Image (spheres, grey):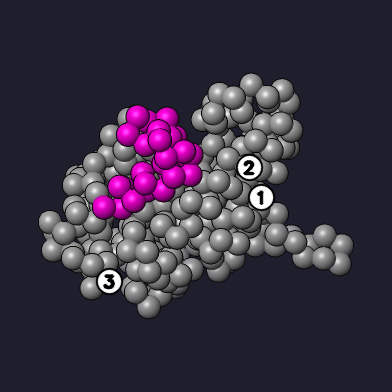
Amino acid sequence: MVDQLIEAIIKTQNPSVAGIDTSLSYLPEEVQKGVKTFEDAGRAIFEFNKELIDSLYDVVPAVKVQVAYYEMYGEWGMIAFRKTCEYAREKGLIVIADCKRNDIGSTASCYAKAYLGQTEVGENTLSAFPADFLTVNGYLGEDGIKPFVNEKKGIYVLVKTSNPSSGELQDLKLENGKTVYEQMGEFVEKWGSDSIGKYGYSDVGAVVGATYKEQAQKLRAQMPHTFFLVPGYGAQGGKAEDLVVCFDKKGFGAIVNSSRGIICAYKKEKYSALGIGGAARQAAIDMKEDILNALKTCGVDKIGG
């Protein structure tokens, strides 16, 4: 699956992913006024997402859909989540379900079926929430990771997250001298060793925040076969010149997420005249150019050479 993502990045020359993390409050005020129920919310959010996807599908290689923004609207929110994933895939986009799932092995298998595999229902085999990648929490160890790997798609394991308090646990030193995040990075590199594709990266990726340049640089050197999902660009303070340490010399190795900066771009004065879809498209193009310009300063003139 990581090869398909890399090829989509090469095609678009864009190593960024649009986060379709849609709260009702992100929609235009006139739309919000007509929403009275969870059903109204789910329908309105999906229509908003469709407009975004229609404007982005040929600009970005992938979308990341954060399930928490949909769960809070109950069953209708989850319907919007599923329909958003399905619609994005229909438009040719790689879909990353950002759900940070995990549990003991048997329960992890259920999560894996829900997002990456299929579930048997009577004589039928159905996909509940079809995605190409899923974010997972690796802190239950290998037996909580194997069920996801067995689905033969892709995962991103939390290694060094972008939030301000991540260091409270992830930066702690272990008896072997490594930090917790470095040890997790070592595990992730090992878990992906059997699924390395033709570009040298495995289907077992890592979440590495754009807000921690020094740690990201260490992890890039430590994890040469691990593809990074990089949150924290834009609204969280991550800058393109800092996150280039996540990439290799060919411009591979990472995909950078922006959510509010793209889906709420129409609310910014510089994009307001473009409408919801047009603003999202231009914001995505601006992000792409920002990252590509930063990569050029490191000798990467074109992704993939």
Q: Name the one closer to the observer, 233 or 154.
A: 233
- Helix, strand or loop for disc 3: loop
Q: Name the one closer to the observer, 254 or 206.
A: 254
Residue on which disc 3 sits: 304
Residue shown at the point (52%, 51%) measured from the top left: 53
Circles 2 and 3, Cβ within 8 Å, touching? The answer is no
Residue 235 point in image, percent of width and height: 34, 33
Seen in the picture, residue 86 relative to 29 is either above or below; the reply is: below
Type of secondary structure dominating the magenta stretch: helix
Q: CA distance from mark 1 to mark 3?
A: 33 Å
**Mark 1 vs mark 2: which is more N-terminal?**
2
Q: Is residue 109 magenta?
A: no
**Mark 2 vs mark 3: which is more N-terminal?**
2
Residue on which disc 1 sits: 83
Residue 274 point in image, percent of width and height: 42, 40
Q: Residue furthest right?
A: 122
Q: Quadrant of the C terminus?
A: bottom left
Q: Is residue 276 magenta?
A: yes
Circles 1 and 3, Cβ within 8 Å, touching? The answer is no
Circles 1 and 2, Cβ within 8 Å, touching? The answer is yes
Residue shown at the point (37%, 36%) measured from the top left: 271
Chain part drawn in magenta: 262-289
- Helix, strand or loop for disc 1: helix
Give, as a three-letter code, the residue at label 1: Lys
Q: CA distance from mark 1 to mark 2?
A: 7 Å
Seen in the picture, residue 54 relative to 124 is either above or below; the reply is: above
Residue 4 point in image, percent of width and height: 45, 70
Give, as a three-letter code, the residue at label 3: Gly
